[in-house]
Amino acid sequence: MRRWSAAATLCLLASLIFASAAQGRIFFTVSAGEPHLVALWSVGGSGGGARKLRARMPVGPEGGVATLSRDGQRILCICRNGEIDSVRLDGTHLRRLGPLPRAVRYGIVTLSSTGRAFWVNGNRRIVSRQAGSRRQQVFRGVAAPEAVLDERVVPSPDGRRIAYVACGCLESACGDEDVQTLLAANADGSDRTVVFRSSGLAKEIWEVAWSSDGSKLIFSDGTGEGDPKGELPVSYPREYFVAPADGSNPAGTRVVLPLNASDPFFSPDATRLIFSERTRSSVELWTSGSDGSGPAPLLPTSCRDFRCEFSPRVFAWR
């Protein structure tokens, strides 16, 4: 009986350890309580063990640029103005990887897990540069003269693909100049695919994030804001969709999240979502099923409405 009890105890402990590992760890940025600064944080997938990894890093218009390296050993970030850096997973050992071009230091720059930085130049071209290199790669994100690119390029977790949004007609005589298109392509611009199409006044594809295996994307469509000129409805609701990255469902599948949700991000197995939720007194991290079911708070943050310049934004879940 004692042998059975000991074996059962060991099995239980092993299952608990496995379950804890299966939950993974979540990495995110959140306002540091000072203008134009964010802090790096991590928390367990079940909400325990929250740790502040780095107290202050400068931000651009996006509210903090960070990603997990492809080997999972470092966080790549724009931790100091004008350069790409890396830190260990505990936020220590800040190391400079390379400079950013002066012209984009205060623009929207995103980082891939390989250390390549991406940004948009001249409304139609996507530029990238590997950290530590001065050689830039440039390609046209759209060829149609009526279309322009949104400023944010979103690399996939393995760094091999990117997603970006084009505003306007991609083909001549498309019949709707207010169309927006979510596109996916290889990091060099090849193999471009239409993932999702949207049209209508005040529509805006935003908050794009990849699943960990790169097979699908989650994103918002709609501004969620009123129209100060009175030309549109008082509010155009923000909706969330998931669509395959191969373009096989350009209409997408709707995901119902709470009214004040933003920036959803997939769990490693894509069965759950984590997102920011603005409550009456603060902005918290919440989780739900991948279809939005069972939303529940995961982690309160120090990001209060009056001081929350940048909401919590998850950049990795491993």
Image: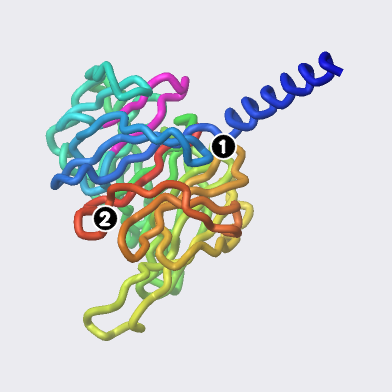
In depth, the one of 263 and 119 nearer the eye is 263
Structure colour scheme: rainbow
Residue 219 shown left or right of residue 252 in the figure:
left
Q: Residue at x 48, y 46 (%)?
A: 265
Q: Quadrant of residue 115?
A: top left
- Residue 118 position, x and y percent, is 31, 36
Q: Which residues are magenta?
A: 65-77
The mark nearer the N terminus, 2 or 1, is: 1
Dot label at residue 268: 1
Q: Which residue is mark 2?
A: 304
Q: Quadrant of residue 136?
A: top left
> In the rendered view of the protein, which quadrant contains the N terminus?
top right
Identify the secondary structure beneath mark 2.
loop
Q: Is residue 277 above or below residue 201?
A: above
In reply to whether residue 66 is colored magenta, the answer given is yes
Badge 2: residue crowd in 10 Å (few <14, some 14–19, many ≥20) = some
Q: Residue at x 36, y 67 (%)?
A: 223
Q: Residue at x 39, y 75 (%)?
A: 236
Q: Which residue occupies the extreme right position in the image?
A: 1
Task: Please indicate, yes or no, whether residue 251 appears anywhere in the rendered image.
Answer: no
In depth, the one of 263 and 203 nearer the eye is 263
- Residue 26 position, x and y percent, is 45, 36
